[in-house]
Image (tube, rainbow, N blue to C red):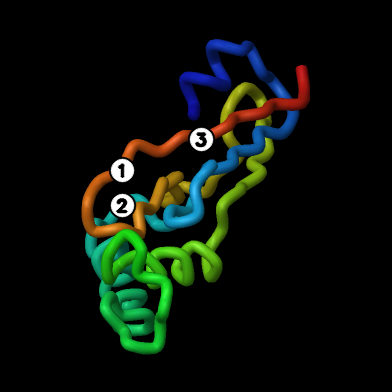
C-alpha cells in the first residue's frame, strides 16, 4: 500500500481498501511478532471450527461456511488516513489480507484514494 500511495503521489487524504470476496478479510494488526497472526488463526479456528455440523452450507468443502462466518466477524473493507505521503499506521501495525479458507485462493482488493 505504501508503494501505491507513493506512486499516486498522495500527500494527504484517505485510502479505502475492499476485498472482493466473502471468505477473506482485511485487518490492521500487530506486524512485528508472527505469534500474533498464529494466535489469531488459532482463536478463530477454535471459535469457528471447520467441519462444524452446525453449518449446512458446505458447497466448497467443510471450511466453506466457517470461512464466511470468520469474514463476517472481521472486516472486508478498511479506510486508512494518509498523512505527509504515508499511511497513518502505528509503529507495530501492518495490513493483512486474511485468507479464511485452507487452500490458497486468488483474491482481488479494490483500492480507492481521495486526497491530494
Residue 105's mark? 1
Quadrant location of the C terminus in the rendered image: top right
Name the foreground residue: 23 vs 95: 23
Q: How many marks?
A: 3
Image quadrant assignment for residue 57 = bottom left
Secondary structure of residue under mark 1: loop
Secondary structure of residue under mark 3: strand
**Mark 2, residue position:** 32
Between disc 1 and disc 3, the foreground one is 1
**C-alpha gap between disc 1 and disc 3:** 13 Å
Residue 3 locus on image (x, y percent): 47, 20
Question: Image point 45% across, 68% down: which residue?
Answer: 70
Q: Left or right: 94 with respect to 87?
A: left
Residue 92 locus on image (x, y percent): 42, 51
Q: Of the two numbered discs 3 and 2 on the same chain, state the one appearing first in sequence.
A: 2
Secondary structure of residue under mark 2: loop
Image quadrant assignment for residue 5 = top right
Q: Left or right: 109 with respect to 59?
A: right
**Mark 3, residue position:** 109
Image quadrant assignment for residue 63 = bottom left
Between disc 1 and disc 2, the foreground one is 1
**C-alpha gap between disc 1 and disc 2:** 25 Å
**C-alpha gap between disc 3 and disc 2:** 23 Å
Figure check: 100 above or below 94: below
- Let me know if residue 28 appears in the view: no
Amino acid at each position: 500500500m505504501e508503494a501505491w500511495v507513493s506512486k499516486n503521489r498522495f500527500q494527504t487524504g484517505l485510502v479505502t481498501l475492499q476485498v472482493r470476496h466473502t471468505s477473506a478479510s482485511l485487518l490492521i494488526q500487530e506486524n512485528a511478532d508472527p505469534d500474533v497472526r498464529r494466535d489469531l488463526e488459532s482463536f478463530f479456528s477454535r471459535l469457528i471450527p471447520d467441519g462444524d455440523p452446525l453449518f449446512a452450507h458446505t458447497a466448497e468443502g467443510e471450511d466453506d461456511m466457517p470461512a464466511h462466518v470468520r469474514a463476517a466477524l472481521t472486516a472486508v473493507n478498511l479506510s486508512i488516513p494518509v498523512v505527509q505521503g504515508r499511511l497513518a499506521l502505528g509503529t507495530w501495525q501492518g495490513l493483512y489480507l486474511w485468507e479464511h479458507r485452507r487452500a490458497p485462493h486468488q483474491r482481488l482488493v479494490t483500492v480507492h484514494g481521495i486526497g491530494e
